[in-house]
Image (spheres, rainbow, N blue to C red):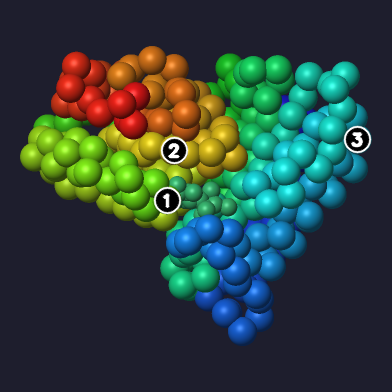
């Protein structure tokens, strides 16, 4: 295993232990709202500190950025930046829903090199390093081979943190529902991407994600033979993401219809 991947796996397991002990145990942690309907807990912060300390010990020269702490270690002379989402799925975590993940990605300049997404509740470790493929608990994974949305299971999420975009989103949601077998909304973007990588979901789309939500999962999808684009089929922009095998992504973009797509979804 790539040495940097190895360290990321170690950090993810350390945080995963903390998550598994505390999931749903609301008396054992503090919860606050960063913005309306956007929760953070003392466990998010504890996990991030744990991950940062494992990474920093192994790579003291690297930049390290976390969702909760920002750029906690900064070195302009290093081309490496770790990007951490200590708990992806905090609302699930607070509610005791065992669908949460630690997400750790490593960028070298603008390229993602390593991605680890770990669900400590199912003990599922999704990993990838650039050029080496993607795996789940040591087994190779691949995106589904469905060539259109017909019969597809598609994950998505409404823009609850950008309510002004809801009408535009509902427009495309309706068209997608009309053209696929069914929809899933899991509460963890990182796991949504990994489920696409493993062929469990045929495709996934969501808007307004942050880099820590998708940096690791994006590499895992690509290394599993998938692609990740924005809503018009160009490289990801503003955290707007469509993921799946190239054909199903193309068929989703056609359903979204770039000519009529609302500006908020571009
Ligand atoms: C959220 C989850 C959720 C997605 C949101 C994310 P958080 O991350 O990934 O599935 O719909 O856009 O912000 O806040 O639980 O780390
Ligand atoms: Ca997240
Ligand atoms: Ca988070």
- Badge 2 is on which residue? 208
Front residue (pair 102, 238)? 238
**Answer yes or no: do the residues labelled 1 and 2 have beta carbons within 8 Å?**
yes
The residue under the point 44% across, 68% down is 97
Residue 21 % position (x, y): 64, 72
Label 1 residue near ligand 1, CB within 8 Å: yes
Q: Which quarter of the rendering shows the N terminus?
A: top right
**Residue 161: which numbered mark, if any?**
1
Residue 206 % position (x, y): 36, 39
Q: Earlier in the sequence, mark 1 or mark 3?
A: 3
- Structural crowding at the residue carrying mark 2, measured as other residues with C-alpha within 10 Å and reported as few (<14), some (14–19) or many (≥20): some
Which marked residue is nearer to the observer: mark 1 or mark 3?
Answer: 1
In the figure, residue 105 lies in which quadrant? top right
3D distance between C-alphas at marks 3 and 2:
31 Å
In the figure, residue 108 lies in which quadrant? top right
SS assignment at label 3: loop
- Structural crowding at the residue carrying mark 3, measured as other residues with C-alpha within 10 Å and reported as few (<14), some (14–19) or many (≥20): some
Q: How many marks?
A: 3
Front residue (pair 122, 73)? 73
Q: Is residue 73 left or right of residue 144?
A: right
């Amino acid at each position: 295993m790539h040495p940097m991947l190895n360290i990321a796996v170690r950090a993810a397991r350390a945080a995963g232990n903390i998550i598994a002990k505390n999931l749903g145990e609301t008396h054992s942690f503090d919860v606050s709202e960063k913005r309306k309907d956007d929760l953070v807990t003392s466990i998010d912060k504890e996990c991030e500190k744990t991950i940062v300390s494992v990474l920093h010990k192994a790579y003291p020269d690297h930049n390290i950025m976390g969702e909760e702490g920002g750029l906690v270690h900064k070195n302009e002379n290093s081309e490496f930046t770790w990007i951490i989402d200590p708990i992806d799925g905090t609302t699930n975590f607070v509610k005791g829903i065992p669908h949460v993940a630690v997400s750790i990605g490593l960028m070298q300049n603008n390229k993602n090199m390593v991605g680890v997404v770990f669900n400590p509740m199912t003990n599922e470790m999704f990993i990838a390093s650039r050029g080496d493929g993607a795996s789940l608990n040591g087994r190779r994974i691949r995106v589904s081979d469905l060539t259109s949305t017909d019969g597809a299971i598609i994950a998505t999420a409404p823009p609850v943190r950008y309510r002004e975009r809801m009408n535009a989103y509902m427009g495309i949601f309706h068209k997608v529902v009309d053209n696929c077998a069914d929809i899933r909304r899991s509460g963890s973007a990182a796991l949504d991407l990994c489920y696409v990588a493993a062929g469990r979901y045929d495709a996934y789309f969501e808007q307004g994600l942050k880099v820590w939500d998708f940096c690791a999962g994006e590499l895992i999808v690509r290394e599993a033979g998938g692609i990740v684009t924005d809503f018009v089929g160009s490289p990801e922009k503003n955290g707007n993401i469509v993921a799946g095998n190239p054909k199903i992504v193309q068929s989703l973009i056609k359903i979204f219809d770039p000519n009529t797509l609302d500006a908020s979804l571009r």
